[in-house]
């Protein structure tokens, strides 16, 4: 099997109809592709990185946005295997037809078991990230960057200063320094540092003594939408 790349591809994107096609991991779905016009294949919120099919069955061209333009050459049904950047693997039974080109958007179907597994993995990653942040340790797949930003006023005359960012693909960790310039202790409340994107928070001191510092560790989810 090989990929056949077509150098010339001229068409209007606006003329293409959109068809949604759900798929499950390592399962096969059936699609119809035009043999007279190019079709656009795309995986929702992902990029196609590999496409395998019988020699001469398709004329294709990959794009930088991760989509794939394909023209069915073989008249008989054949199998197209697709692999994505996000780790999805599935196959399609391609049927050739004389029709206008279309856009087919493949949408992964997440099973209940897969969803539970994903939630557990995310929780474990959050716990691990928090531990590494508190201990000032690096964590694989996270880029650590010192922040040079001015301090700002918090309630009760406290000052808060961003210090370090742990940047990952789906999670972001932030470390802040909180200083108490007052002559009396101040109780630090988690609600002062929360918003809807925060998944976990740790404060090094429940009560901040006068002229002392505390650290606030926050982990937020990155929305790619």
Image (cartoon, rainbow, N blue to C red):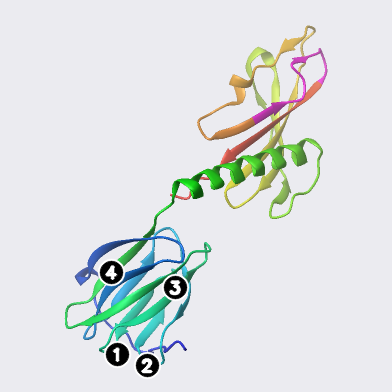
Q: First in sequence, mark 4 or 2: give its number.
A: 2
Q: First in sequence, mark 1 or 4: give its number.
A: 1
Q: Is residue 63 visible?
A: no
Callout 2: 10 Å neighbours few (<14), some, many (20+)? Answer: few
* Magenta stretch: includes residue 203: yes
Residue matched to label 2: 56
Which element carries disc 4, helix, strand or loop?
A: strand
Image quadrant in which you'd find residue 107: bottom left
Quick check: 12 above or below 119?
below
Quick check: 159 above or below 9?
above
Quick check: 189 above or below 132?
above
Q: Point out residue 142 in the picture as x, y percentages from the top left corner.
A: 69, 51
Determine which of the numbered discs, if any, sits on residue 89 in the image: none
Residue matched to label 4: 103
Magenta extent: 201-212
Residue matched to label 3: 82
Residue matched to label 1: 74
Q: First in sequence, mark 2 or 1: give its number.
A: 2
Foreground mark, 4 or 2, reads 2
Image quadrant in which you'd find residue 155: top right
Between the residue at mark 2 and the residue at mark 1, the CA separation in whole angstroms equals 7 Å
Instruction: Work out which residue is located at the far left of the displayed protein and give it.
Output: 99
Residue under the point 76% across and 17% down:
180
Instruction: Work out which residue is located at the far top of the displayed protein and give it.
Output: 184
Q: Are dots 2 and 1 in contact, CB under 8 Å?
A: yes
């Amino acid at each position: 099997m090989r990929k056949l790349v077509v150098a010339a591809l001229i068409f209007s994107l606006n003329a293409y109809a959109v068809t949604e096609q759900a798929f499950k991991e390592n399962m096969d779905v059936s699609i119809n592709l035009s043999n007279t016009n190019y079709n656009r294949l795309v995986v929702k919120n992902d990029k196609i990185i590999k496409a395998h099919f019988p020699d001469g069955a398709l004329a294709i061209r990959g794009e930088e946005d991760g989509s794939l333009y394909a023209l069915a050459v073989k008249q008989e049904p054949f199998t197209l295997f697709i692999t994505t950047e996000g780790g999805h693997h599935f196959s399609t039974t391609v049927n050739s037809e004389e029709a206008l080109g279309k856009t087919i958007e493949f949408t992964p179907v997440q099973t209940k078991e897969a969803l539970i597994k994903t939630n557990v993995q995310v929780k474990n990653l959050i716990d691990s990230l928090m531990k590494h942040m508190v201990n000032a340790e690096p964590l694989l797949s996270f880029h650590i960057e010192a922040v040079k930003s001015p301090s700002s006023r918090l309630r009760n005359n406290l000052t808060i200063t961003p210090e370090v960012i742990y940047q990952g693909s789906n999670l972001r960790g932030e470390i802040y320094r909180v200083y108490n310039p007052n002559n009396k202790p101040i109780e630090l409340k988690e609600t002062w540092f929360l918003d809807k994107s925060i998944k976990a928070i740790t404060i090094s001191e429940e009560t901040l003594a006068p002229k002392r510092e505390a650290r606030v560790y926050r982990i937020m989810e990155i929305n790619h939408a």
